[in-house]
Amino acid sequence: MSAPALVRLEHQGELAVVTLDNPPLNLFNAALFRALTETVAQLEADAPRGVLFRAEGRVVSGGVDVHEFAALEGDTGRAAALWTELLDIVHRVEELPCPTVCAAHGLCLTAAFELSLACDLLLAARSARFGLVEIVVGLTGPRRRGLRRRRPRAGRSPGRRSHARPRSHQADRRRRRDRRTAGR
């Protein structure tokens, strides 16, 4: 019996559906990074008309598996390689020659949040909560575009505040703020 796929690529007509399926929290680990890298390579090789990124379970992702950090302790080369791999995936999704959509629900943290910001459209359920946990552990830097991409999507104030103090943002809160500022 083969191991279950951590990332599934399915085609529904001309639409590709990429599903994260690493229960219970869809944590990003080395195997999920590899599977996502292979999936993006398939999308690049045979571009569909559009791509939907989604996740199974109650959350999109609880972030990067802490065991990955433990394995990297003291090895700055491997730590740099992990973040380079994540950024490579994100940049490649941004460069796909077709529209990309991320459907978010529950938690959408760290690598999943980066992935969602790389998509052309982010559809968020009321339950969606977004955050970059890297701010807390000091893993942000000038090469990371997530904070810069966050500002136009989350709004000026939450985007600016995210640099100073980490917190997650609820999708419903953004919707209410947009209604208040509509027509200005």
Image: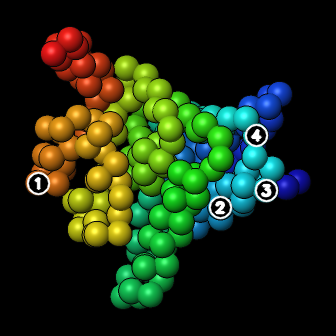
Q: Residue at x 58, y 58 (%)?
A: 92
Q: What residue is rendered at 49% in x and 78% in y?
A: 81
Q: Is residue 72 above or below residue 74?
A: above
- Whether pointer 3 and pointer 4 mark residues with C-beta atoms closer than 8 Å, the reply is no
Q: Residue at x 68, y 35 (%)?
A: 50
Q: Who comes first in sequence, dot 2 or dot 1?
A: 2
Q: Is residue 143 left or right of residue 96?
A: left
Label 3 Cα neighbours within 10 Å, binned few <14 / some 14-19 / many ≥20: few
Q: Quadrant of residue 44?
A: bottom right
C-alpha gap between disc 2 and disc 1: 32 Å
Which circle, 2 or 4, is nearer the viewer? 4
Q: Secondary structure at mark 4?
A: loop
Amino acid bearing label 2: Thr
Q: Which residue is mark 4?
A: 48
Whether pointer 3 and pointer 2 mark residues with C-beta atoms closer than 8 Å, the reply is no
- Under tag 3, what secondary structure? helix
CA separation, marks 4 and 1? 39 Å
Determine the CA span between mark 3 and mark 1: 40 Å
Q: Is residue 92 above or below residue 126?
A: below
Give above or below for 106 relative to 119: above
Disc 4 residue type?
Pro
Q: Position of residue 172 (x, y in %)?
A: 30, 20
**Where does label 2 land, which residue?**
37
Do we see residue 67 in this rendering?
no
Q: Which amino acid, mark 1?
A: Ala
Residue visible at 65% across and 61% down in the picture? 37
**Going from the N terminus, do you reach mark 4 or mark 1 first?**
4
Helix, strand or loop for disc 2: helix
Spatial distance from mark 3 to mark 4, Cα to Cα? Answer: 10 Å
Give the labeled residue for mark 3.
45
Quadrant in which the C terminus is drawn = top left
| Earlier sequence position, callout 2 versus callout 4 | 2
